[in-house]
Image (cartoon, grey):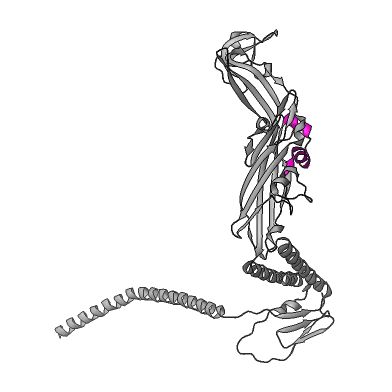
Amino acid sequence: MRADTEQHQIERKINNVEGWRNIIQKPARSSSVKMSEGLYTAVMGIRDFLKEYFNGFWDYETPKMMVIKNRPLGVIYRAVQFLVITYFIWYVFISQKAYQQSETHPESSVYTLIKGKAEHGDDVLDNVEYAHPPEGVDVISATLRREFTYDQRQGTCPEHFSVDNANCTTDSDCLPGLPNFDSHGIRTGRCIQYHNHPFKTCEIKAWCPIEEYAVVREPPLVQAINFTVFIRNSIHFPKFKVLRVNVESPPGMKTKKYLKRCHYHEETAPYCPNFRLGYIANQARENFTELCRTGGVIGVFINWDCNLDLDPSHCKPTYTFRRLDLRKDLADSGYYYRFAKYYDKNGVESRTLIKAYGIRLDIIVHGQAGKFSVIPTIISTVTALTSVGICSIICDWIMLTFIDKNEVYSERKFDEVSKKVTKEPTDTIRTEFSFISSYGSNHSDLSDGVPL
């Protein structure tokens, strides 16, 4: 009896332990179920999204044709069409020649030479004296006026009074070796009288006498207006294997003989590369007398625009002229340079400083050539046809934004058709003035009865 009682107590304790264990494990099991349900929901959502995207990816969209009998909208549509077609025909195909394969970086060679004689005082000048360099490439200059400073020697002399801080009263005003960009030399530290003038300037060590004090100015070389500039230009288009030169004599005349007597003229002598300096200045709208006084830089632009669908003989150069340097109303305008001629005088090295004013010619060559090619023609044609579609986009925007007040057009324009098509009764759309009936066909006719 006692043994049965003890066994009963043991079983009751065991049951209590298992009961407490179930109570403890129940919240954990409930939390695990909730996590599984959330994960399942997320996976199913992703699966449904991918399935819907995959099925929609294979859908086909086709534009729906609608005939809208609205005069203002039709006028806008035809006007935009006319502008697009005119742009491509006139500008793209005719003006820009988009049907051609082009080359815009040709190989070019330039040779220049200035020719002429001039009597200057008692001297006769030739191109060796006034042309620098005598034979050039794409840059050449002609001297029109000179200023001389004779018998300069190494020594000390007073600085010119126009230089900043050059005027002085005592030696303390002239610090030795003080750098100055406008100075003609290096200061010695002394304040001396400026030649025969009552004032003083700082003494410098330089080529003396300085230019501003002892310069001798010659009159301009006015006869240079008739000097001739010979410009020979050869241009090569390697893509098309075409070589052209701006020199060509008339039939029956030798080139050498022709070049001795011809001068360039746009119509009568387009292949004569001889240009008078006066003609160049006039074409650049410059006064030749003013150029003799200050000098200047003029650009000679040679342009080759060749349509190789025609015979290469039609490829002719055109010339334009323009002033390139700063205008004459500025302080440092014009073109000039200095050089010196050195000699020995009484055992002392001396020189004559020459400041030369002149015209510098910069020869600048541009060239482009084009020839018919199938690929550019196809690309330009496809672009033109595609661009016509802009007309429909613009008119659709106008229609849906400004005209479709009752959303009649938008309901007809956008339809969704599935595989299972069931024929429904005719839909009738009531408007203020008329009715529009359709079975949802792919071609609709909207008349002016639709209120705008």
Residue 290 forms part of the magenta stretch: yes
Q: Quadrant of the C terminus?
A: bottom right
Question: Which is the main secondary structure of the residues drawn in magenta?
Answer: helix
* Residue 251 spot, x, y in % from top left: 74, 54
Picture layout, residue 449 above or below residue 84: below
* Residue 17 spot, x, y in % from top left: 26, 76
Please report the residue visible at 70 percent of the width from the left and 43 percent of the height from the top. Answer: 300
Q: Find the residue positioned furthest to the right.
A: 433
- Give the left or right position of residue 279, taking residue 349 as reference: right
Picture layout, residue 298 above or below residue 380: above
Viewer-proximal residue, 19 or 256? 256
Q: Quadrant of residue 288?
A: top right
- Give the left or right position of residue 52, taking residue 263 as reference: left
Q: Quadrant of the N terminus?
A: bottom left
- Give the left or right position of residue 343, taking residue 69 as reference: left
Picture layout, residue 20 above or below residue 333: below
Q: Quadrant of residue 180?
A: top right
* Residue 110 spot, x, y in % from top left: 63, 45
Q: Quadrant of residue 114?
A: top right
Magenta segment: 274-294
Residue 435 visible in this rendered orientation of the protein: yes
Viewer-proximal residue, 38 or 344? 344
* Residue 28 spot, x, y in % from top left: 36, 73
- Give the left or right position of residue 53, taking residue 62 as reference: left
